[in-house]
Amino acid sequence: MPTLSVRIDFEAGDRIGPGKIQLLENIAAYGSISAGARAMNMSYKRAWDLVEELNRILGKPVVSARTGGKRGGGAELTALGHSVVIRFRAVERAAAAAAEQHLASLQSEREDQTRE
Amino acid sequence: MPTLSVRIDFEAGDRIGPGKIQLLENIAAYGSISAGARAMNMSYKRAWDLVEELNRILGKPVVSARTGGKRGGGAELTALGHSVVIRFRAVERAAAAAAEQHLASLQSEREDQTRE
C-alpha cells in the first residue's frame, strides 16, 4: 500500500520535511546534536546547518545548550522545537488519514493494471 | 501562511509527487510530451524518463500516441494517466484541508516568536 510524505513549504522556498523533524526528534532522544545526527548517519556539520535553517525559518532557536546534569554539555529542544515536532507529526497523521481512501483506490487500480 | 506539499511513496523508493503530476497535466493540456515538457522548462529527455518511470510504477502506460486528427502525432493521457492525476490532486486537497488548522497554529506560533 502506498504511503504519503508531507512537507511544509514557507515563503522563499523554505521548507520543513521529515528529515529535519527526525533530526529534532533524535536530538531530543540522544541529548546532543552530534549524537542525534550520528543516529541517522548525518554529519555534525549538516545537522548544525539544518538546525540553523530551522531557527531562521521559525524566528527563534529550536535547540538550546543543556546546562547542568552529571555530564554537562549536550543539547535539548526548546519549547518551540518540541512544538514544531508535535505539529509536524500531527499534520502528517491528519494528511495520511485524509488520503487513505484515495491511496487504497490508487493501489487497487495499480493491481488491476498489472493483473490484466 | 505555510502550505503543504505531498508525495506518494511506493515500494523500493518509487515516488509520485507534484512534478510528475504537473508533467502529465501539461501533456494532456498541450497534446504532446515535448510541448508539455517545454511548458515547464523540462527537457524532452527528462520528460520521457519521468513518463517511463510512471509507466513502470503503475504497471501500464500513462501516455499514448494520439492517432488521427488534423495534425497527427502528439500524445494524450491514457485512462490510467488521467486517473492518477485526479487521485493525486484529490489526495493533495484532502491532505491540505486536514492540515489547515495545524498549519495556522504553526504560523501563529512563528509570528509570536518573531514578535517577541
Image: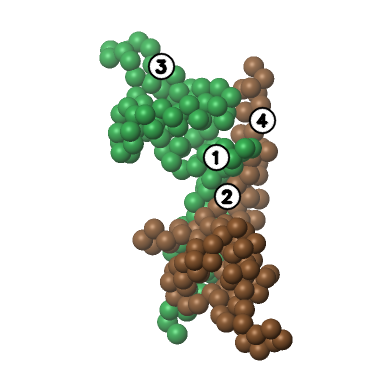
Chain colours: A green, B brown
**Horizontally, is B73 left or right of A65 in the view?**
right
Q: Are marks 3 and 4 in contact (CB under 8 Å)?
A: no
Q: CA distance from mark 2 to mark 3?
A: 32 Å
Residue with the most extreme bottom position: B68
List x then y, in percent, for residue B66: 62, 83
| Marker disc for residue B108 | 4
| Figure quadrant of the C terminus of chain B | top right
List x then y, in percent, for residue B107: 64, 33
**What kind of element bears circle 1?**
strand
Q: Residue at x 62, y 59 (%)?
A: B40
| Marker disc for residue A74 | none
**What kind of element bears circle 4?**
helix
Report the residue marked by disc 3.
Answer: A65
Of all chains, the one bearing label 2 is B
Report the residue marked by disc 1.
Answer: A15
Q: Amino acid at mark 3?
A: Ala
| Dot in front, 4 or 2 | 2
Q: Amino acid at mark 4?
A: Ser
Q: CA distance from mark 1 to mark 3?
A: 24 Å
